[in-house]
Amino acid sequence: MNKKIIGILIVTLLIATAVLPVLGTMNYVNNLNVSSTLSTIEWSMTYGEDRFEMLQCVQTTSDGGYIACGVKSAYDLDDVYRPWVLKVDSSGNKEWEWYPEEIEFEGDYYNYFDECTCFFVKQTNDGGYITGFKVMANTELEEFWLSSIVKLYESGEVEWIENCMDGFDWCFSPISVIELEDGSFLITGFSGTTKIGDLEDDACLYKIDSMGVEQWCKEYSYGVSDVAFALCETNDNGYLVTGWADNAENLSDFWMIKTDSNGNKIWEKIYGGSNQDFGHARNCYQTSDGGYIMSGYTYSYGNGQADVWIVKTDSMGNMEWNRTYGDKYKDLCWSFESTNDDTYVFCVTYNYGSFASDKEDFHLVKTDGDGHIIWVQLFGGEGRQIGQHICKTDDGGFIVSGRNGRHFNDESDGMLVKFTAFSNERPNKPTIEGPTKGKTGKEYTFTASATDPDGDSLQYMWDWGNGEYSDWLDTNEATYTWTTEDNFEIRVKAMDEHGGESDWSDPLAFSTPKNKSINTPFLNFLDNHPHLFPLLRQLLGL
């Protein structure tokens, strides 16, 4: 098969199965070698000048183009950051941008912002756009958090701006939005004081009408600092809110909240381990079976410093399964997309922070409804590629927004990457042939057999039944030596050229039985009286 390889991604996606208390099943996957082809990238564009820029969200528009938002540095001031909305055509060419140089609050205008977040933008039913931001306003006398929701006309001109604040006492930080049938908007985020350095925040669900006027606001508290990152409508006309919450040990856990249509909490669930776990993805979904799925990243589980973590629940929030994806360094997911065939595509930034000798790349990981990998596509090359948001496109492909440099570095530009539609079928479940009994210290050979519906070449990974796993091997034969006497169940799985993984094979039972020992009263007597051995040798003439 002719392919132009643009990079080889070594990902450690989980394969060993372990039972976690309360949590469910964790899968560990090791040493996944995946090649990505240039044919899957339709185009990539960067946007910016000699200052820091990043694009934190991207969505499709009705004219076939795209709308994106993020943060852009001031042209004429150092360390000043402002919200940024960018409209491009179907090929990524800029059409217009919105970039406010000052923001009004309580009759005063502010134009010096030490920090800025602008997490969402979305085309509205009337053809315009809605976005929201939070900035650290700084004057000679004071600094405070200032946040607003902005409605733009289709041309990019401002229709209205509403501060989501209560004087200088309370501030709502917007993160995700959905538009409701009546033209109103529901926004997730977190709320707290406007005071810089105050870390006591509550997750928040904030409803406004079509003109930005507040309808109601619901706050949810679990620990000291709680954040709602994602939101979706549910089949019962309520909402699912996901994010993270502090636990009793002041560590963050995944947090799922189910509400009614007025934002009243029906139930909540916490998922996490002994370390930090952040439900940071700005997407969550109700699944076809009535359950829910959320994502983020974990320091408690997986293979590295941080790995992508996916949690699937039933309709009451009880965990059904969870999986991690990642290498031995820091691998993060801020966004994932649901597709029409009950599958999901996760935008994963590999080696975030460049703790390895290589720098960041991002890759798309498509899974089925049970978390099994269908394909992996990589966007890499020179420099850094950090994927922050993914959106499916009308042609079956995907578009990703992000940046190509370090955070708050002047060399970083905003980035959009368009992926074409891509299909792949997972390999069939392998079978195993080999011995079923053996001895410790002796090497044994096993053979796997599997086929791929697309005719791709396959690699194999072995689970030796004792907590050890092989790397991905180019051959279907593998050898192993056991060092303990016990009964084992050997399994193998296959992976194709595009990262698609099979199910685990049925187990092959293998045993290294203990040696039978001769046990008689006479030998036991000699064992307890070793001083008699010289006399016995003399009597027997030995």
Image (spheres, rainbow, N blue to C red):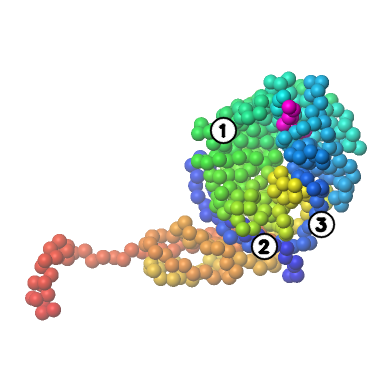
Cβ–Cβ under 8 Å for marks 2 and 3 = no
Which corner quadrant holds the N terminus? bottom right
Q: Residue furthest front?
A: 140
x and y percentages locating residue 203 in the rendered image: 65, 29
Read off the residue under disc 3: 42
Q: Is residue 349 magenta?
A: no
Q: The residue under label 3 is which amino acid type?
A: Glu
Q: The residue under label 2 is which amino acid type?
A: Ile
- Residue at left offset 44%, top offset 63%: 510
Figure check: 38 above or below 390? below
Read off the residue under disc 2: 8
Q: Quick check: can you spot residue 61?
A: no
x and y percentages locating residue 523 in the rendered image: 17, 65
User: For the residue labelled by badge 3, is the local secondary structure a helix, a strand or a loop?
Assistant: strand
Earlier residue among tags 1 and 2:
2
Q: Give the range drawn in magenta.
A: 132-140
Q: In this view, does 419 lie to the left or right of 303?
A: right
* The quadrant where residue 279 appears: top right
Distance from disc 2 to disc 3, alpha carbons, whole Å, reads 19 Å
Q: In this view, does 437 lie to the left or right of 81?
A: left
Cβ–Cβ under 8 Å for marks 3 and 1 = no
Read off the residue under disc 1: 246
x and y percentages locating residue 321 in the rendered image: 58, 45
